[in-house]
Amino acid sequence: MGLENVKVVLFDTFGTIVDWRGSITRFGERLGRDKGIDGVDWEAFARAWRAGYQPGMQRVRSGERAWTGIDTIHRERLDEILGDFGIAEHLGEDERRDMNLWWHRLDPWPDSVPGLVRLKSRYLIGPLSNGSVVLLASMAKRAGIPWDFIFASDTFKAFKPDPAVYTGAIELAGLEPGEVMLGAAHNDDLAAARAHGMRTAYVNRPYEYGSDQSVDFEAAEDWDIVGETISDVAAALGT
Amino acid sequence: MGLENVKVVLFDTFGTIVDWRGSITRFGERLGRDKGIDGVDWEAFARAWRAGYQPGMQRVRSGERAWTGIDTIHRERLDEILGDFGIAEHLGEDERRDMNLWWHRLDPWPDSVPGLVRLKSRYLIGPLSNGSVVLLASMAKRAGIPWDFIFASDTFKAFKPDPAVYTGAIELAGLEPGEVMLGAAHNDDLAAARAHGMRTAYVNRPYEYGSDQSVDFEAAEDWDIVGETISDVAAALGT
């Protein structure tokens, strides 16, 4: 079954569609100016916040912890690191709650929306993300990301690479696995999608993590599509 | 808690947002012309097809039948009635399969998209429908319905008024029940939403069923909003 059978194109979102590191850094710099908080390396803060993401999800994936949404995982990590960066004493509860919503307001990479608009002309498109429905819908609304629907971790009560996410997405799409494609900047996400029979598109995002990045500088397997932008994926799919 | 706390506005879709009777009738009339099928009352055909909807869902709701999606229920009913209308001998399998997708291509009532665009400026909006994700996403894409996300029967593996749909929607919205509103043309759907603590908006659609319509000519309870159009709901919610 070739790419001509693809009907639905899903995308990982954090890192693939949106630039979390740049966005959180910018929000931090703005907060620092507004609050007169000096001397914070906001880019290091962004990476430290993100560093709690996989461990937080792993406790849920492993069954150590009952289903817990991504907003809670983000918030717990925020509370862990605020002190380390000398920010805690500047912020009350309302401000912390608003900071947690920075993840709902991430900016897309410049090529994302143009590429998705092209893809949407022929395919049903949606995220397949460890974000929540509300996080992803709020982000899409603010940034003009034109999803047809949203497949989120709370749709399936599971985090990638839990098989329930991929099989759940294929089932909700009402299609054969080979009619559904996942686009992602992460080789491990694509490997999981391929293991479930999905088509795969690698989008190279070598600047996702900055100085913390140690993997995903190139395609690690012969993915069905390999590109530098979402527009490359759109072109490879004939749009 | 007043309407100022509403953050997410969901809508029943068949009958409330889209005119299934007029749409199926028009598709039928076009098929009749294309195929030279004479003498069919396509409006009666539309109502007969729809008449299989509640009984088909009820077998699932009651537990008599395992989870079965709406496309299958539509298709089974189609196969039941094609003979009665003298259409069966004109149609092969491919044509029947395409007919079943008429439900993915229903036209909105004229006020629906303008009203939803207004609501979307301030609220997260989505369907809360017994349709499927793919049916609702395909319909939205064709008609320009600007949903932020899609809550469908296959999201919850249940059909309204099963409580799992309302409680599942509130949970996915990540909100208190009173922060979520359901808009619907059906008093029983609103009664179920209210029973779960949701806010309610009645939209009067007295022409939904045509000569088959026996209920829902007016608001049966003191719903939070009562209007004739989606724009009336948008206005009542300050957009």
Image (cartoon, coloured by chain):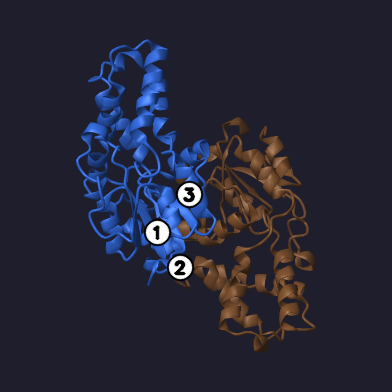
Chain colours: A blue, B brown
Q: Does dot 1 land on a helix, a strand or a loop?
A: helix
The single residue placed furthest to the left in the displayed view is A214
Q: Is residue B132 visible?
A: no
Q: Which residue is mark 2?
A: B67
Labels 2 and 1 positioned on one and the same chain = no
Q: Residue at x 28, y 22 (%)?
A: A82
Q: Does dot 3 land on a helix, a strand or a loop?
A: helix
Kindly indicate whether the residue at mark 2 contacts the one at mark 3 (C-beta within 8 angstroms): no
**Residue A233 percent across, percent down from the top left:** 41, 54
A222 versus B78 height, above or below? above
Q: Quadrant of residue B231?
A: top right
Amino acid of disc 3: Leu
Mark toward the start of the polypeptide (3 vs 1): 3
Q: Which residue is mark 1?
A: A169
Labels 3 and 1 positioned on one and the same chain = yes
B190 versus B20 height, above or below? above
